[in-house]
Amino acid sequence: MKVTVAGTGYVGLVTGVCLAHIGHEVTCLDVVEEKIEMLKNGKSPIYEPDLEDLMLKNKDRLNFTTNYKKAYKDADVIFIGVGTPERIDGTANLDYVNEVARQISESIDKDTVVVIKSTVPIGTNDRIEEYLNGNIKNGIKVRVASNPEFLAEGTAVKDTLYASRIVIGTEDKIAEKVLKELYLPLTKKPYNVPLLSMDRRSAEMVKYASNDFLALKISYINEIANFCESVGANIKNVTLGMGYDPRIGNKFLNSGIGYGGSCFPKDTKALHWLSKSLDCELKTVKACIEVNKDQKLRLFHKLKNSLYLKDLEVAILGVTFKPNTDDLRDAPSIDNVELLLEYGANVTVYDPIGLDNFKKRFKDRVNYASSINEAIKDKEAVMIMTEWKEIKEYDLNNYVKYMNKANIFDGRNCYDLDDFKNIDAYYVSIGRKDVGSLK
Ligand code: UDX
């Protein structure tokens, strides 16, 4: 099929490349010229494992353009995968989605299925369909379907090809048939992805309900971790014991300094706002947001309660909101570093992938290191913000060897408490007892 995907961010680009991989002719469209130039040269503007390989493999079925008229004109299916960022008041900003809809209405020449992949407030698909059919040439019909995306950054390609499920939301039989055909290669071997067909509003809701549930699970376990500190329990043992119950499961039970990223923070706030506006406030989601806000600074407060921050030499290990991505959106590192600087600490940061993005924001307000060894050298404290593999596997003896004072504040529980038996360091983590004494 001829497919056009609007937006070349995590959702749009990965969707486009994966659809090309399963045999479709795909045009990826973006308004940012530089991104399209990079893509034409085989380079992905986002760091995402496996994506460039797949772009190369399927280059004959992939086009990249900024020309929306051409891109939309004769597409069988148009995916909308543009961002729906959070407004200051927590509502979802639909400006990009609306602009794409306007451009589609100007451009199409035949019946088209428009699929909204972006996370949008409930009822947006209805509204966009109404808008499109009211603004296109007479005699043409647009069918709008919801098809939420469940990919996580860092595993986006795998999450798309071997998706946990494909959700299609449409009451229109033709749109349903087209999308079932489009996804046929994924619902068969070797992928065997389950495809669920439902009404549009439920499909829109599946996305919010799933993301908010996962965010809630994290906030819950973070609160339990904080409580473990008060009662002398170890959160790692507690979650180990909980995770064996199949009704709970052992995933998304890692306590730490809170969730960040492009989805959980904005989707919890958007759904909470929507629920309030409908006079049916989701109080659990409200609590989840509040807990996460506090949790992000929990490690900072532990550091501040232990050491005088003015002129303190601090290293930050990991700045991205999670490992295997260069994304800094809502990363706990941002608020923590801002606060450290406000209190007068000297900050050196290290991250295997995220430093370029971090530099755009912090410029020369912090120092940048090109390795863990370099970052922690002569420091009086280190804060671990992201559990990159190389940080988790780092030789603990090096903290003692390189740091001026080996005070380790671990916001991601990277190490076992027993690992510090023969290490002369002070180790503070989340939901567990501190080990050693302050240096
Ligand atoms: C998430 C959803 O997983 C995905 O299905 C949706 O489409 C988009 O949002 P993503 O934001 O890429 O994906 O990352 P995810 O792996 O879910 O992690 C989100 C945040 O939660 C990260 O900051 C991570 O550090 C944190 N997290 C995750 C925890 O603190 N503990 C956990 O146990 C799991």
Image (tube, helix red, strand yellow):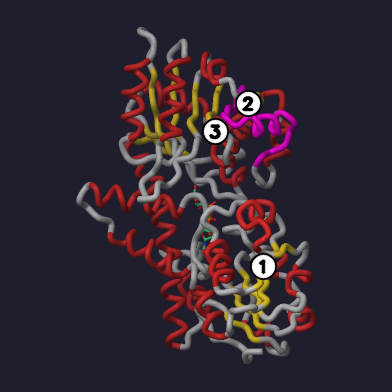
x, y percent for residue 41: 75, 31
Q: Do the residues labelled 3 and 2 touch (CB within 8 Å)?
A: no
Q: What is the CA distance from the residue labelled 1 to the residue labelled 3?
A: 32 Å
Of labels 1 and 3, earlier in sequence is 3
Q: Which of marks 3 and 2 is in front?
A: 3
Task: Check the picture and name the quadrant holding the N terminus.
Answer: top right
Mark 3, residue position: 7
Q: Determine whether the beta carbon of the residue marked 1 sits less than 8 angstroms from the nearest atom of ligand 1.
A: no
Picture layout, residue 232 above or below residue 81: below
Amino acid type for the residue under numbered disc 3 = Gly
Range shown magenta: 23-45
Mark 1, residue position: 317
- The one nearer the camera, 402 or 144, is 402
- The one nearer the camera, 379 or 117, is 379
Q: What is the CA distance from the residue labelled 3 to the residue labelled 2?
A: 20 Å
- SS at mark 2? loop
Q: Is residue 53 left or right of residue 412?
A: right
Q: Determine whether the beta carbon of the residue marked 2 sits less than 8 angstroms from the nearest atom of ligand 1.
A: no
